[in-house]
Image (cartoon, rainbow, N blue to C red):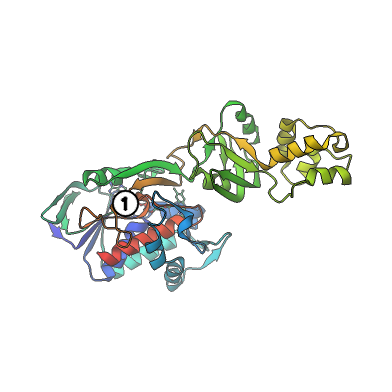
Amino acid sequence: MTDYDAIVLGGGATGLMCAAVAGQRGRRVLVVEHADRVGKKILISGGGRCNFTNLGVAPDRYLSANPHFAKSALGRYSARDFLALVERYGIAWHEKTLGQLFCDGSSRQIVDLLLAECARGRVDIAVGHAARDIDHADGRFRLSFGNCEAGAPALVIATGGPSIPKMGATGFAYDLARRFGLKIVEPRPALVPLTLGGDETLFRSLSGVSADVLARAGKASFREAALFTHRGLSGPAILQVSSYWRRGDPVAIDFLPDRAPGWLRAAKREQPRATLRSQLAAALPDRLADVLAERIGLVRELANCPDAQLDAAERRLAGWTFHPNGTEGFAKAEVTAGGISTAELSSRTMEARRVPGLFAIGEAVDVTGWLGGYNFQWAWASGWAAGMAL
Ligand code: FDA
């Protein structure tokens, strides 16, 4: 039995951050990772360039049953703090769009940074073994992995959520949390493509077509690209609204968010021989213009269309309502919304209120960020908060 000050379950973004911070504070830390190497999701993130943070990080860009929970950790370890770490390692980066920061080179650089930080903190990392026989007695946690046994007064759940199971993602965090009596907010796929059925399957003919739109679900709206797929809708705007979407809700798309009301009447005055289709094709991909004009059913020249019909067409284009019949599920979800209830945790330390020494961080917790580096920032910030408390 090897004694540690803390055992971190999961060698992903948040687990490595937490272990490095605690290790550099003089704690003896063990990370147990069941995959054959650490940081697998970091490696595939951001198309291989890791969108490691976002300059626009703010608590209202995170979903949680308690919208205030993330404030403390995000405030104490900011996007600028992680950026300073990236710069200390000489990693070149760039801002792509909307405050999203990416490595110029490769995601591997972020994994190497975290491993170097863990090495500075003399962290032990065991890969290729799941933790077994987890036990808690007399204020100590004990567990086995491979042929080894380890014990510590602190155990950190950093095993993420079940999104992308083929990469080894599991619901282990929830099972373990439940064993300790912690509540779980129903997990659901987030940042995930939506599927269309019924007569909306007609839009599948547009598979591969994308357009800059304003997409809305509930009170949330995002101005980004939407992409038609062979199963439904995807692209950043749709992934963003998917986190807010609930089964049965519509998703509304404004296909021409820059057009002021009355634009079709104005087009009728200025180009009476034009058609709705030609007007749409000037702003949208041809195939999309065809399908929208066809579905609206306004084929005559604008001069021959009553204003009321033009107004109705405009309204439809500004709030085209889709009725997704589901999502592509955890298999395609970039993250999991829901998870270990924040009501169970201290927002300052991430320690379970009812189980001293037990911590939960990262995606395992009911805090889910927008697309664009927000989720890694939560992983860094919550990992840092726990690492400072261990
Ligand atoms: P994470 O899932 O990273 O790590 C958990 C670790 O625990 C894994 O290494 C896993 O193998 C291990 N584990 C699981 N069960 C275990 C067990 N029983 N015992 C031991 N170990 C166990 N976010 C972002 O901000 N910018 C981006 O560019 C992207 N890009 C992106 C692309 C893709 C394809 C996906 C799927 C996701 C993203 N994300 C992202 C989201 C981001 O990857 C995610 O929010 C973080 O990885 C969460 O970090 P965690 O450490 O909490 O979980």
Q: Position of residue 111 (x, y in %)?
A: 39, 60
User: Which residue is drawn at the image coordinates 28% and 51% (left, top)?
Assistant: 344
Neighbours of disc 1 within 10 Å: few (<14), some (14-19), many (20+): some
Residue 17 in view: no
Q: Position of residue 266 (x, y in %)?
A: 83, 46
Q: Residue furthest left?
A: 138
Q: Which residue is mark 1?
A: 343
Q: Position of residue 107 (x, y in %)?
A: 46, 58
Q: Nearer the viewer, residue 368 or 203?
A: 368
User: Which residue is drawn at the image coordinates 42% and 62% (left, top)?
Assistant: 110
Looking at the rendered structure, the secondary structure element under dot 1 is: helix
Q: Quadrant of residue 378?
A: bottom left
Q: Is residue 72 above or below residue 10?
A: below
User: Which residue is drawn at the image coordinates 79% and 36% (left, top)?
Assistant: 308
Residue 326 in view: yes
Q: Residue furthest front?
A: 308
Image quarter of the N terminus: bottom left
Q: Which three-letter amino acid code belongs to the residue tagged 1?
A: Ala
Q: Is residue 388 above or below residue 292?
A: below
Q: Nearer the viewer, residue 95 or 103?
A: 95
Image quarter of the C terminus: bottom left
Q: Is residue 46 above or below residue 206?
A: below
Q: Residue furthest top?
A: 198
User: Which residue is drawn at the image coordinates 32% and 44% (left, top)?
Assistant: 184
